[in-house]
Amino acid sequence: MRNLARNTFALTCLVSALLAPSLALAGLDEGLAAVRRGDYAEAVIHLQPLAEAGDATAQSEMGVMYANGDGVPQDIGQAVKWFRQAAAKGNATANSSLAFLEAAGLAADSAAASSAPSPTPSPTPSPTAASPDEPGAAPQSLIQIATLSTEAAAAAEWRRQHRRFSEQLANLNPTILTFDGGERGILYRLFAGPLEHSAARATCDGIKHLGGTCLVIRQPPAVPPPH
């Protein structure tokens, strides 16, 4: 009887070990499916445990959600933390996203955040609040495309990106805003939009699907009126 109990226990452990990768894969598939349909609260339920367990794809997706504020509070520090962990495992998407945030000057103060525990995610409120310029309208977002060293380079980059992603950027306008890059001097951020947030996210996803890089800014800086 003692040997039977020992063998049964060993068999149970073996079955659990064999099932664990399948269960993790199922959870990842469910999380990614939730991302594709825009159900970010559901995506977090599936992806965050996998990210914390070390899955690079889940970590990369958590980085995107923290960067955009989808299903969790927008937190660039947390985004950088997840991107760095995924990039360290060779995830190309996370590496590209991390490079983009660093070039934009958004990752400079994230070292502490990269070791801090993730805050408890809370559902992102639906975009129903009115914007100051258009009462009753949904809040607008911008798609950040690149960070350049000169305004002329930013304008040239817009023309290049507009040709490359003609379908995604066809009806959007460019906006170039400056920011202090510290030792790098004044830098120029290139944005496209504005769009309602879900449309901006869909456009950015389309650009990424074609090999581009972008970041959706849910609460963009004030855009000066055209001259």
Image: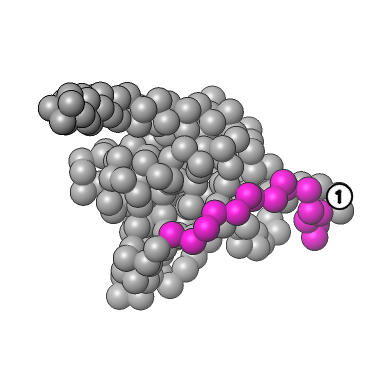
Q: Which quadrant of the figure contains the N terminus?
A: top left
**SS category of the residue bearing label 1:** loop
Is 140 on the left or on the right of 186, as rendered?
A: right
Quadrant of the snapshot with the C terminus? bottom right
Residue 29 is situated, as x and y percent measured from the top left of the image, at 42, 26
The residue segment tinted magenta is: 118-133
In the rendered image, which residue does mark 1 sit on?
136
191 over 81 or under it: above or below: above
The percent coordinates of residue 44 (x first, y second) are 50, 43
Q: Which residue is drawn at 36% across and 27% down?
A: 23
| Drawn side of residue 95 relative to residue 225, left or right | left
Which residue is most to the left? 3
Residue 67 seen in the current view? yes
Q: Residues within 10 Å of mark 1 (few under 14, many from 20)?
A: few
Please say whether residue 108 is visible from this viewpoint: no
The residue shown at (20%, 41%) is 90
Figure quadrant of residue 113: bottom left
Residue type of the residue flagged with mark 1: Gly
Residue 93: x, y in percent?
A: 32, 39
Secondary structure mostly seen in the magenta stretch: loop
Residue 7's image quarter?
Answer: top left
Instruction: Tell me, yes or no, whether the highlighted magenta stretch contains residue 71.
Output: no
Front one among 127 and 162: 127
Residue at the (78%, 48%) spot, across then down = 128
| Residue 216 higher or lower than 5, as above or below | below
Horizontal side of 183 relative to 165 (left or right) equals: left
